[in-house]
Amino acid sequence: MLHFIGTSIVIFLGITALLTQTWSNFMYVPLAGYGFAWVGHFFFEKNKPATFKYPVWSLLSDFIMYFDTINGSLEGKLSAAAKKFNKKRL
C-alpha cells in the first residue's frame, strides 16, 4: 500500500509540474516515491529495498505494481509468485 501511495504522489507531482510548469515539484518526486516505499521495507517488511542494488529495475517494478493494483491483477500475480517460491501469502 505504501508503494501505491508513493507512486500516486509521484504521478500527481509529475502531472502538476507539467501542467503548471512548476518545475520545482520534480524535486519532491524522489522523496515521495522512495520515502513511502522505504518506510514499508525498513519498518514493516524488515528487508532491504532493491533500489540500492537495482535502481532502474526497482523504479520500473514500482510502476508495474502500481498499474497491476489498479487493474486488479496484483493479487493473482503475488499468489502465483508465492506458489512458485513455496511461501504463504500474507
Image (cartoon, rainbow, N blue to C red):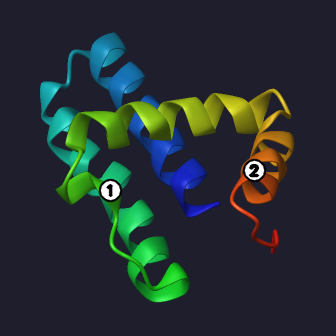
Q: Earlier in the sequence, mark 1 or mark 2?
A: 1
Q: Is residue 20 above or below residue 85?
A: above
The structure residue drawn at horizontal position 61% and vertical position 37%, both measured from the top left corner, is: 66
* Mark-to-mark CA distance, 1 and 2: 17 Å
Q: What element does badge 1 sit on?
A: helix
Residue 78 tag number:
2
Q: Quadrant of residue 27?
A: top left
For the N terminus, the quadrant is bottom right
Q: Are marks 1 and 2 in contact (CB under 8 Å)?
A: no
Amino acid type, residue under disc 2 in the picture: Leu
Whole-percent x, y for residue 84 in the image:
74, 51
Whole-percent x, y for residue 82 in the image:
75, 59
Q: What element does badge 2 sit on?
A: helix
The structure residue drawn at horizontal position 26% and vertical position 53%, both measured from the top left corner, is: 51
Residue on which the image places disc 1? 50
Amino acid type, residue under disc 1 in the picture: Ala
**Which residue is more in the foreground, 76 or 3?**
76
